[in-house]
Amino acid sequence: QVRLVESGGGSAQSGGSLRLSCAASGKMNRINYMAWFRQAPGKEREGVGAINTRDGATFYADSVKGRFTISQDKAKNTVYLQMDSLKPEDTAMYSCAAGQIDAVYEGWVPRGVGFDYWGRGTQVTVSS
C-alpha cells in the first residue's frame, strides 16, 4: 500500500504563487510516476502534470505549461507542485497520485489510468 498526503493548498491572488507538497509513504518500489490532478466544481478531473520518479522527467498539461513546475525530493519521498502566475481558472481541488506507468510519449499528460494510489486532495482558490 502507498499513502499520499497533500499539503500547501490555500488562497492566492491572481498572479500569485503557491507550492503544494505530496508526501508518500509505504511500498514505493513499483511506483515510477507521481502526478498531480485537479478538479473544479462541475468540471471533469484534469491531469496537471507528472514526474518520472526514476529519472525526473516531467510532463505538463498545456493549460499549466510554463507556469507550474513539478519536482521531487527523493530523500523525503515528496513531490512538489510549484504554481506561479496563478489564474482564477486554476481554482480546484488538487490531488496527487502514484502509479506504475509502462510507457509514455511526447506530449503525454496523465489521465488517471495506471495511477492506483490517490491522496485526499488540497483546495486551491485563486481570486481575481
Image: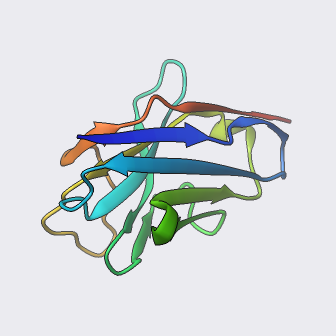
Colour pattern of the rendering? rainbow
Residue 69 visible? The answer is: yes
Viewer-closest of 127 and 9:
9
Position of residue 116 relative to residue 41, above or below, is below
| Residue projecting furthest to the bottom | 55
The picture quadrant where one finds residue 113 is top left
In the rendered image, residue 106, in percent from the top left (x then y), is placed at: 29, 75
- The residue that appears at 21% across and 62% down in the rendered structure is 29
Viewer-closest of 14 and 113:
113
In the rendered image, residue 111, in percent from the top left (x then y), is placed at: 29, 47
In the rendered image, residue 96, in percent from the top left (x then y), is placed at: 44, 44
Residue 62 visible? The answer is: no
Position of residue 46 relative to residue 35, above or below, is above
The N terminus lies in which quarter of the figure? top left
Position of residue 66 relative to residue 82, above or below, is below
> Is 81 on the left-hand or right-hand side of 107?
right
- The residue that appears at 59% across and 50% down in the rendered structure is 21
> Is 31 on the left-hand or right-hand side of 13?
left
How many tags in the picture?
0
- The residue that appears at 66% across and 59% down in the rendered structure is 82
In the rendered image, residue 110, in percent from the top left (x then y), is placed at: 32, 53
The picture quadrant where one finds residue 57 is bottom left
- The residue that appears at 41% across and 77% down in the rendered structure is 56
The C terminus lies in which quarter of the figure? top right
> Is 100 on the left-hand or right-hand side of 11?
left
| Residue projecting furthest to the left | 102
